Image: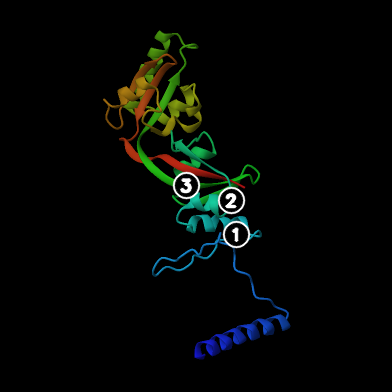
Amino acid sequence: MRAAVIIFILFTAISATASAQQKGGKTLPKPASTGGQWTPLQPGSQPAPAKTVSPKMTIGQMKTAIEQSGNSPLYVKDVLKKKFKLDTIIVRRTWGFLGLADSLAYHGKINKVYGPYDKGKFLVQILAKNPNMFNHIGQIYLDTSVFAPKVADSVATSIINRVKEGSASFEDLAVTYSMGGESATQGDLGWIAVGAMIPEIEKELKKRKKGEIFKVWTAAGLHIIRKTDDPEEKDGYALMMRIFL
């Protein structure tokens, strides 16, 4: 009898609460269907709040959210619902880049999101970097399709002697004689990645000391090379993610 009274009191209280909410214009929410099963929580765990993205999220907010996500590919896929592509980019030189990709691969900071690019079509995030060895060289190039080989060799010998004697600088002679694009940079080719140079030049560089000037013959012509610096390790590879907006 006592148990029946307690059940009646509880039922009355629940009914009164529901009635009060209905009078206030509210109804009790129905529990979500779980296929007839309750999903038990693990001891000490709490239900994770659903991740949502505001449809009004600006590009700036999106970039910040990606950087702070901790797992940006997963965040982009599951939360932002955006497509992405991972690219491994090789840095061949530290300036005079081939395009946006290798420029970002060298200058960009890990985890930073850049863009948008291509008229707002995508963002780029730097996920990781790896080093490579780079050589810093100068060049005066003589095209043997213009100069006869003997003439080119004679000119090259004269150039090297003038630099060694101090009667002219390598930079000035590069502007005057070089038949490649380096004439616009006073012969400076900058830092070039190991493996990205003409093999004959790279092989000869290993034998030379910093500051040496020497000739290298290749199928392209005659190269007067200056080893400007000893090899250095720099950012040579980057794993990047393009996020399509």
Q: Closer to the camera, 4 or 21?
A: 4
Identify the disc placed on residue 53: 1
- Relative to residue 6, is residue 27 drawn left or right? right
Q: Which mark is residue 136?
A: none
Tag 1 and tag 2, C-beta contact below 8 Å: yes
The secondary element bearing badge 1 is classed as loop
In this figure, which residue is indicated by the disc labeled 3? 126
Q: In what element is the residue under mark 3?
A: strand
Left or right: 210 as drawn, with respect to 76: left
Earlier-in-chain disc, 3 versus 2: 2
Quarter of the image where one finds residue 27: bottom right
The answer to whether residue 178 is seen in the rendering is yes
Identity, as a three-letter code, of the amino acid under mark 1: Val
The image position of residue 136, as x and y in percent, is 37, 34
Q: Residue at x 30, y 28 (%)?
A: 212
| Along the viewing direction, whichever of 152 and 243 lies nearer the viewer | 243
Give the residue furthest to the front: 1
Separation of residues labelled 1 and 2 (CA atoms) = 9 Å
Question: Which numbered disc, 1 or 3, marks the residue that appears first in the sequence?
Answer: 1
Categorize mark 1 by other alpha carbons within 10 Å: few (<14), some (14-19), many (20+).
few
> Please, what is the three-letter code of the amino acid marked with disc 3?
Ile
Disc 2 marks which residue?
81
Where is 29 relative to 231, above or below? below
Question: In which quarter of the view is residue 60 placed?
Answer: bottom right
Of helix, strand and loop, which one carries label 2?
loop
Residue 159: image location, x then y, percent: 38, 21
* Residue name at image x 49 percent, y 55 percent: 67
Measured from the top left, where is residue 45 in percent x and y?
42, 68
